[in-house]
Image: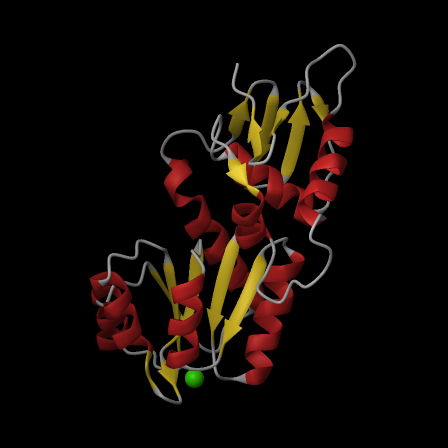
């Protein structure tokens, strides 16, 4: 998933970016309201972690503007303020959840997982396409009954495809959601990761669960 961390405290921002990256997310960071708006204008994010007090403005105003623009992305608001009125203001402004500083990183990670799970939680918490299953809660993947160990990036790539079964996902779309803005490596990085995924998901006698749509991208084959 692609995440935006909007936080002006360098130390805290580094901890958040490092932790969320290690969990396999593509994470961008902004330290100001203006920087956040720039990122939001370029990428479609799956979740935004938003600090309340920023050097050039208020996270509440930014959240209100995002909602007014029709953005449905989950927002986890961070603040040093702890009063009930700020909680209410944050939720009124459109935040989905709220975390008062100081907090321990695992608490933030748990809230992020819960928010990212939310749309799927009501129907199928475990994603299933054909004989491939993926459990976002425990970061596990199976082909049939066989558990398939994946790297965090491979997991994110597969999760993105599996949330859009049968839909063709372009290379740019995948780069945008699974890799972060500072990615400047090889342009065939998507193809390389898809090749690794296919090799790991291979089951003798069974068809390839990922289809190449020539010149366009990839899709999860639906039965
Ligand atoms: Ca701040």
Q: Extreme top residue here?
A: 205
Asked if residue 100 can be seen in this view, the reply is no
Q: Position of residue 26 (x, y in %)?
A: 58, 58
Q: Position of residue 216 (x, y in %)?
A: 55, 36
Name the residue nearer the viewer: 176 or 133.
176
Q: Within the image, what quadrant is residue 15 found in?
A: bottom right
Q: Which quadrant contains ligand 1?
A: bottom left
**Number of numbered discs on residues:** 0
Q: Position of residue 135 (x, y in %)?
A: 57, 35
Name the residue nearer the viewer: 99 or 142.
142
Q: Position of residue 152 (x, y in %)?
A: 68, 48
Q: Within the image, what quadrant is residue 45 found in?
A: bottom left
Q: Extreme bottom residue here?
A: 55
Name the residue nearer the viewer: 125 or 163.
163
Q: Residue at x 37, y 72 (%)?
A: 37
Q: Residue at x 61, y 30 (%)?
A: 214
Q: Extreme front residue here?
A: 215
Q: Within the image, what quadrant is residue 186 found in?
A: bottom right
Rendering colour mode: secondary structure
Q: Residue at x 76, y 31 (%)?
A: 200
Up-down relation of residue 159 to residue 70 (above or below): above
Asked if residue 168 can be seen in this view, the reply is yes
Is 60 on the left or on the right of 211, as rendered? left
Q: Residue at x 50, y 33 (%)?
A: 168
Is 210 on the left or on the right of 34, as rendered? right
Is 222 on the left or on the right of 53, as rendered? right
Up-down relation of residue 123 to residue 99 (above or below): above
């Amino acid at each position: 998933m692609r995440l935006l961390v909007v936080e002006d405290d360098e130390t805290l921002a580094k901890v958040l970016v490092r932790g969320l990256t290690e969990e396999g997310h593509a994470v961008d960071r902004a330290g100001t309201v203006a920087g956040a708006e720039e990122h939001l204008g370029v990428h479609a994010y799956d979740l935004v972690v938003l600090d309340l007090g920023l050097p050039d403005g208020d996270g509440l105003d930014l959240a209100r503007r995002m909602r007014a623009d029709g953005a449905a992305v989950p927002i986890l608001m961070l603040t040093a303020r702890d009063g009930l009125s700020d909680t209410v203001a944050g939720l009124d402004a459109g935040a989905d959840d709220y975390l008062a500083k100081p907090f321990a990183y695992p608490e933030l990670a748990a809230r992020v997982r819960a928010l990212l799970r939310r749309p799927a939680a009501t129907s199928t918490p475990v994603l299933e396409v054909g004989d491939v299953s993926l459990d976002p809660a425990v970061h596990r993947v199976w082909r049939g009954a066989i558990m398939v160990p994946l790297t965090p990036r491979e997991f994110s790539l597969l999760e993105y495809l599996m949330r859009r079964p049968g839909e063709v996902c372009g290379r740019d779309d995948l780069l945008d959601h699974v890799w972060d803005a500072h990615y400047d490596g090889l342009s065939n990085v998507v193809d390389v990761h898809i090749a690794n995924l296919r090799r790991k998901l291979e089951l003798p006698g069974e068809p390839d669960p990922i289809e190449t749509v020539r010149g366009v991208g990839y899709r999860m084959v639906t039965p």
